Image (spheres, grey):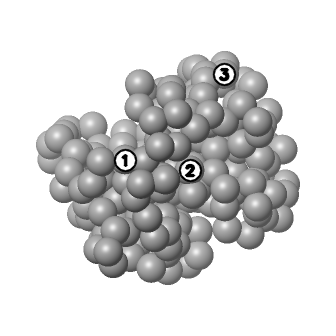
């Protein structure tokens, strides 16, 4: 059901504290550019020169999603959602990017990959800028894999600094249709 929803431009979120799930397809839709419009903030460039983050992928998927749930006030990542995305991970659709300092997990993000589209779901950090570094690593990985769409669902001030922009739903669905036809490897 989740994969069918993503293919149609729909994603789930809990709508109350009891974990009831709602299905959303916002108009407009926020996306991060995978081309030259992707922007790395100047301050983050300085951080990367000072700190040596280790980047891994899919090593600690369940820990990443649990941290996203734990560190977010009003989380939508209830046990049913967590179990569903862990199952998608075992099936090869859901992926995580982890950032580490001195071997310790300090940030990360997760989402779902279908064709040439990646649907970003959530991110967390325990160390300053760790989730931003994970996002940069995700964009590099998607570019290398031939992906053409990075869906962030809604825009936030945090994501805007990277060049996130909004497009009307009909345009998003057109991009999604094209992206789903591609055979990309995460």
**Residue 64 or 21: which is nearer the viewer?**
64
Vertical placement of residue 138 versus 25, above or below: below
Which label number is shown at residue 32? Answer: none
Q: Name the residue under label 3.
A: 167
Q: Is residue 33 left or right of residue 174?
A: left
Q: Is disc 3 in contact with disc 1, using a CB cutoff of under 8 Å? A: no
Question: Measured from the top left, where is residue 65 in percent x and y?
Answer: 33, 62
Q: Mark 2 points at which residue?
A: 136
Crowding near the residue tagged with mark 2, few <14, some 14–19, many ≥20 C-alpha atoms within 10 Å: some
Question: Measured from the top left, where is residue 109 in percent x and y?
Answer: 43, 56
Question: What quarter of the picture does the C terminus occupy?
Answer: bottom right
Sequence-earlier tag: 3 or 2: 2
Disc 2/disc 1 C-alpha distance (Å): 11 Å
Q: Mark 1 points at which residue?
A: 129
Q: Tell me the SS state at disc 1.
A: loop
Question: Measured from the top left, where is residue 64 in percent x and y?
Answer: 34, 65
Vertical placement of residue 106 versus 167, above or below: below
Q: Tell me the SS state at disc 3.
A: strand
Query: Between tags 3 and 2, which lies in front?
Result: 2
């Amino acid at each position: 059901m989740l994969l069918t929803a993503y293919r149609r431009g729909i994603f789930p979120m809990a709508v109350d504290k009891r974990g009831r799930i709602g299905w959303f397809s916002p108009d407009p839709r926020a996306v991060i550019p995978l081309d030259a419009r992707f922007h790395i903030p100047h301050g983050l460039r300085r951080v990367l020169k000072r700190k040596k983050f280790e980047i891994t992928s899919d090593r600690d998927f369940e820990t990443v999603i649990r941290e996203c749930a734990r560190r977010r006030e009003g989380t939508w990542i209830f046990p049913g959602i967590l179990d569903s995305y862990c199952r998608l991970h075992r099936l090869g659709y859901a992926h995580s990017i982890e950032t580490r300092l001195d071997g310790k997990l300090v940030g990360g993000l997760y989402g779902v990959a279908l064709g040439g589209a990646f649907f970003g779901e959530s991110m967390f950090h325990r160390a300053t800028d760790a989730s931003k570094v994970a996002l940069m690593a995700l964009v590099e990985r998607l570019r290398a894999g031939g992906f053409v769409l990075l869906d962030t669902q809604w825009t936030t001030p945090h994501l805007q600094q990277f060049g996130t922009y909004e497009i009307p739903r009909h345009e998003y669905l057109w991009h999604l249709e094209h992206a789903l036809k591609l055979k990309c490897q995460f």
